[in-house]
Image (cartoon, coloured by chain):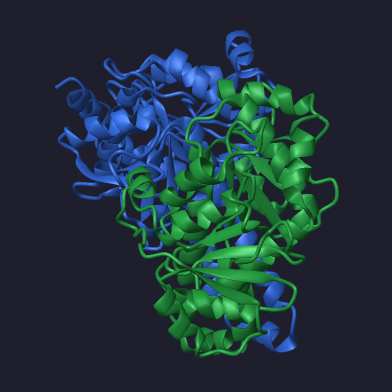
Chain colours: A green, B blue
Amino acid sequence: MVNLETSKVPVIAIDAMGGDNAPVEIIKGAVSSASSDVKLILVGDEDIITSELQKYKYPEGSIEIFNATQVITGEDVPTVAIKQKKDSSMVVGLNMIKEGKAGAFISAGNTGALLTGATFIAGRIKGIERPALAGLLPNDNKTHTLLMDCGANIDCKPNYLLQFAEIGSIYMENVIGIKNPRVGLLNVGTEEEKGNTVVKEAHGLLKNSSLNFVGNVEASMISTGIADVIVCDGFVGNIVLKHTEGLAKSIMKMVKEELMSSSVSKFGALLAKGAFRKLKKRFDYREVGGAPFLGLNALVVKAHGSSDAKAISGAINQCNIFIKNDIVNKIKDRINI
Amino acid sequence: MVNLETSKVPVIAIDAMGGDNAPVEIIKGAVSSASSDVKLILVGDEDIITSELQKYKYPEGSIEIFNATQVITGEDVPTVAIKQKKDSSMVVGLNMIKEGKAGAFISAGNTGALLTGATFIAGRIKGIERPALAGLLPNDNKTHTLLMDCGANIDCKPNYLLQFAEIGSIYMENVIGIKNPRVGLLNVGTEEEKGNTVVKEAHGLLKNSSLNFVGNVEASMISTGIADVIVCDGFVGNIVLKHTEGLAKSIMKMVKEELMSSSVSKFGALLAKGAFRKLKKRFDYREVGGAPFLGLNALVVKAHGSSDAKAISGAINQCNIFIKNDIVNKIKDRINI
């Protein structure tokens, strides 16, 4: 077993058994990202993983297997599963980051279980009140907007939102490469006095912080790239994240229906096929690979339940940059000024 | 002046001075909807309206003018404006419905002022705790989904959400023509135990009601038409309404950019122009004409700030059906069982 302290390359643990396309696509994604610059540990049923890995060639020593006999399924109750399935690929993987054996953990499995397990097992950075799930939403300015919290904390205090902004800014600056990220507070109006009690108080905290706070952001502006980091409570964030996914799908369905309704537009659509493919790519969650769960002593990435090899590869890439840039210590420094 | 009690046709008051395109487009919209089946009252500066009306022909007696010397602007503070601008077109129009001189009032002016004024002047239906703003969102099932509350009540109690569902169902059944409308509760998961305290309690109330409750609805399903009425608090509803508008615009911008990036796809786009126009129409707020503010002793419709003649005409049509179907009394009957 690799030791994180002595390893010269980032060590990333991957839940080989979680998600709709596990283990085949998860393992395929790991293989496609395997290189001498990273150490990948596939956590799950040793026999299954070994036999699957035999299909591929990859740099020697770049992939290891760590056995785990149980699997947390989508039907499992998160809190119960984390407590009872001690030898599940998810719990074993989270323990690896707790014990410093890996700098990041990726899972496409049960979201609730992953968030619960990550908080209880991996542990929060000292000073962080609530770790939060960040969603990377595409915007029409050809970049991404980090929305957090996307569902880990249904009820939030004003100070949580300030911390989300601080952590999110560090992430966008160091992992996505946006200098001095603009922070917006999601609200029902741009005026300072708008919103509920929590949001109004958070506005004051953000205004007095050293962040690049651009004020309240109305929902109509989320997709324009008006801010690089947008903060809100986990209830609202979850609604926005899922509505983005659903509405983008619905609009593409409507576009298709309209195009197929006449032979002239059908021919037009054929010629414009490449353009549509590119657009679809912009909304493809696989491009970013998953949602980072931030504020923990290591990075935990929630990959989409239907992740394929490409999505897992994207998540691995995200983890790699995160570890190389020492984001955990950057967050520690910021929070404990 | 027409008397609502004795008028045989629906009487609709219209704020001729509110909105970006007032008074020209508002008056044009009224003229295009003028008929012997409806009585329209344009509220605002008599001289301006008279001179504008002279440009058009319309059935005699179908349009009246009611003078109001002041205008509430977008910059006015809602509560202050409603109190101080007693002779504004908005306050005068709301007083007309309070006094039974009109069965509905349409304004494209200051949203906050209209909601505040409507509640204080027009008055709630007895038994209604909070009137709510309903948004008609297009879905990929070729119908509309009524989302309420879209911003009138930032903080809600569980019982408000139940009432939103009751009023919304009556509206969808009688104005939009959907039999036994399916009601969904917007939430972060489909499971009953999901959500914050308010939503969890509202779930119980909805489940035990006589409504056609289909359970929790995740945001990814809003645009699929999974429910005809979706209820949530005004903070969340406002975010969803505005994000729908913003994201649809962003996606269309992205489609255009991709299509213009090569000459082949540009030619394809030309052929598919008609299809895109039809799609744009589906997301055109002017088709529905505005958001009904429900639970008052009359219908108040908040037309989009940038409403043109077509939007105003759509709003008039909505009001006409509302009055003809006696929705206020239908809500009264339902609430006071």
Residue at the limit of the structure toward the right, as seen here: A179
Task: Give the residue drawn at x 48%, y 27%.
Answer: B152
Instruction: Locate residue B242, reporting x and y percent.
Output: 56, 44
Rendered location of residue A13, percent (x, y): 57, 63
**Residue B16 image point, x, y percent:** 58, 32
In-image side of B60 versus A3 (left or right): left
**In the displayed structure, does residue B11 sit left or right of residue B334?**
right
Q: Quadrant of the N terminus of chain A?
A: bottom right
In the visual, does B112 lie left or right of B205? right
Tell me if residue B116 can be seen.
yes
Is the residue B20 above or below the residue A8 in the image?
above
Name the residue nearer the viewer: A13 or A314: A13
Q: Nearer the viewer, residue B299 or A223?
A: A223
Q: Is residue B98 above or below residue A312?
A: above
Judge whether B290 appears above or below B119 on screen: below
Q: Residue at x 38, y 59 (%)?
A: B224
Expressed as whole percent of the image width and height from the top left, the position of residue B106 reads 48, 33
Viewer-nearest residue: A62 or A20: A62
**Along the viewing direction, whichever of B276 and B312 lies nearer the viewer:** B276
State the count of labels. 0
Q: Is residue A224 toward the left or the right of residue A46 in the image?
A: right
| Residue A83, picture quadrant | top left
In the picture, which quadrant includes the C terminus of chain A? top right
**Residue B66 seen in the figure:** no
Which residue is depicted at the point 20% across and 49% down? B179
Which of the 4 image quarters holds residue B156?
top left
Q: Does residue B256 lie above or below A248 as drawn?
A: below
| Residue under the image location 26 percent in, 45 percent down | B215
Return the residue found at the far top.
B84
